[in-house]
Amino acid sequence: MTAPNGNGSAHSAATTAFDFAALTARERYKLLIGAVIPRPIALVTTVSKEGIANAAPFSFFNCLSADPAILALGVEYRPSGAQKDTGRNIRETLGFTVHIVSEAILAAMNVCAVPFEPGVDELHEAGLATAPGVKAPSPRIVAAPVAFECRLHTSLGIGNSREIILGEVVYAHFHADLVNSDNHHVDPVALDAIGRLGGHGYSLTREMFDLPTMSLAQWQAGSIPERVPHAPFVPAPPRR
Ligand SMILES: Cc1cc2nc3c(=O)[nH]c(=O)nc-3n(C[C@H](O)[C@H](O)[C@H](O)COP(=O)(O)O)c2cc1C
C-alpha cells in the first residue's frame, strides 16, 4: 500500500528543473499542458452580434467558484494576433454556453476545433443539433450531457496573447438520467466525461474510487481511511 505521505511513489527523488523565465512560450505551454492533467473540456457555444452560432473546445477550463457559480476559460489569440471567434462573440453578446465533453460528443468536438473562417457555424459542420438558450444568447448542444448557460462576469487580458473569461452560470441543463434532482448528486459514470492530456492526448473517467477527507480528530487518532470502490449513483425516486 502506498504510504499516506507519498513515500510509496515509484518516482525517484531526482528532479529536472526549469526556470520559466528562460523558457520559450511553447516550452512553458508543453510543460503545463503535459503536467496539469487531466483537464476537463468545455465545448463552448457562442453567437455573434450578427446571429451566427459558433462552437469550440477549451481545456484551459475549470469551475473556480460555486457562490457565485463561476466557470473560467483560457482563450488564446491566434498566431496572427486575431481573437478567436469565441472570445469576440462573448464580448459582443455577453453570454456563452459551456458543454461538458463526453465520449458521445468527442468526435463532434474535434470537428469544432478546426480553425474555420469566422462566420462558419461549427455546430452545423459537426452535425450537432441545438436548442435555443433559456437565459444565454448561445445555443445549447442537445447531445451534450451537461450544458451551463453563462453570463459574462469578467474578462481578464493576460499579456497580449490571451484572455481569461469568467462566466457566471445562470441556468443549467443535465440529461435526466445523470442527475438526482432531490440531492443534486451527479452520476460520473453516466456523465462519461473526457479529460485532456498533453499533445493530442485524452483520457476517460472510468476508473473511480472514493477516499473520504479526514477530520482533524481522525487524523490525530491515526484513523487513515482506505480508498474504497466509488459509491454507486442513486437516482431520485420517480415522482407520483
Ligand atoms: C481538446 C481541445 C482543447 C482546446 N483548448 C483550448 C484552450 O483551452 N484555449 C484555446 O485558446 N484554444 C483551445 N483549443 C483550440 C480551439 O478549440 C481552436 O483554436 C478553435 O478553432 C477556436 O475556435 P473559435 O475561433 O471558433 O473560437 C483546444 C482544442 C482542442 C481540440
Image: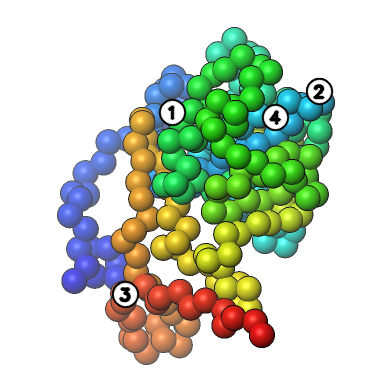
Asked whether the beta carbons under mark 2 and mark 3 sit within 8 Å of each other, the answer is: no
Find residue 70 and report its horizontal and vertical position in percent: 69, 52
Kindly identify the amino acid type of the residue bearing the numbered disc 4.
Ala
Asked whether the beta carbons under mark 1 and mark 2 sit within 8 Å of each other, the answer is: no
Taking the image as shown, residue 179 lies to the left or right of residue 213, namely right
Kindly identify the amino acid type of the residue bearing the numbered disc 2.
Glu
**Under tag 1, what secondary structure?**
helix
Compare marks 1 and 2 and give the one earlier in the sequence.
1
Q: Residue at x 79, y 27 (%)?
A: 51
Q: Quadrant of residue 36?
A: top left
Relative height, residue 218 to residue 14 (above, below): below
Kindly identify the amino acid type of the residue bearing the numbered disc 1.
Arg
Q: How many marks?
A: 4
* Mark 1 → mark 4, Cα distance in angstroms: 33 Å
Q: Which mark is residue 28?
A: 1
* Mark 4 → mark 3, Cα distance in angstroms: 42 Å
Q: Which numbered disc, 2 or 3, marks the residue closer to the eye? A: 2
Q: Residue at x 30, y 67 (%)?
A: 5
Kindly identify the amino acid type of the residue bearing the numbered disc 3.
Pro
Relative height, residue 153 to residue 238 (above, below): above
Instruction: Report if residue 50 is visible in the image.
Output: yes
Residue annotated with mark 2: 50
Compare marks 2 and 3 and give the one earlier in the sequence.
2
